Amino acid sequence: MIHVLFVCLGNICRSPMAEAVFRQIVTEKGLEKQFVIDSAGTGDWHIGHPPHKGTKELLGQKGINCDGMKARKVTDNDFKYFSYIVAMDAQNKEDLMNLARNNSIGEISLLSDYVPSSLWKEVPDPYYTGNFDEVYNIVEEGCSHLLQHILKQHQLTV
Ligand code: 4NP
């Protein structure tokens, strides 16, 4: 099993979008049985809340279901369980590194790390920008490259 966790601040806008998009891409390739995919936030304000209306609407437009998703906060156990912990922005990554205290079994990265010469380095926060379309395009590009990276590392072919 390959365990992948997407992390943002509130776990209601960007990381649930990445979780749902990555799951969709993995499922399209018939690899869903080989993955555990989840998301979490570094903040606790939205614990138990469903994805933001903007994320929900955009995923709906793309035919991706996010029913039942609920925000949660990153836990110590996440660092023992997930081999890929993928942050949406530099602050999320810094917070994760501090929480992990060198005890992570896997790689703590930025989504943009997987996109060669990417024009974006961080996933902008639509909670403030209101631009969910932009986030979807970025997340889709990032998730496709992340999957290629993982498939290569695990010598999987599709
Ligand atoms: P997210 O966006 O990190 O992409 O889920 C945010 C959601 C909520 C807040 C900030 C960012 N907030 O301050 O409540």
Image: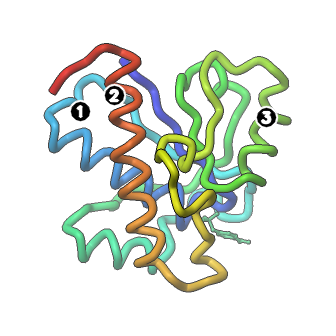
Dot 1 corresponds to which residue?
32
Image coordinates of residue 86 in percent, x first then y, are 57, 41
Dot 2 corresponds to which residue?
35
Q: Quadrant of residue 81?
A: top right
Secondary structure state at the residue bearing disc 2 = strand
Residue at 45% from the left image edge and 26% from the top image edge: 3
Task: Examine the rendered structure and indicate whether residue 44 appears above or below residue 132.
Answer: above
The colour scheme applied to this rendered structure is rainbow
Q: Nearer the viewer, residue 132 or 157?
A: 157
Task: Examine the rendered structure and indicate whether residue 112 appears above or below residue 37.
Answer: below
Residue at 38% from the left image edge and 43% from the top image edge: 145
Mark 1–mark 2 Cα distance, whole angstroms, equals: 5 Å
Is the C-beta separation of discs 1 and 2 under 8 Å?
yes
Residue at 40% from the left image edge and 22% from the top image edge: 2
Task: Examine the rendered structure and indicate whether residue 10 appears above or below residue 97.
Answer: below
Q: Nearer the viewer, residue 70 or 138?
A: 138
Q: Nearer the viewer, residue 73 or 19?
A: 19
Secondary structure state at the residue bearing disc 1 = helix
Q: Quadrant of residue 152?
A: top left
* Neighbours of disc 1 within 10 Å: few (<14), some (14-19), many (20+): some
- Residue type for callout 2: Phe
Q: Quadrant of the N terminus?
A: top left
State the count of labels.
3
Image coordinates of residue 87 in percent, x first then y, are 62, 47
Discs 3/1, front: 3
* Neighbours of disc 2 within 10 Å: few (<14), some (14-19), many (20+): some
- Residue type for callout 1: Glu
Q: Quadrant of the C terminus?
A: top left
Dot 3 corresponds to which residue?
97
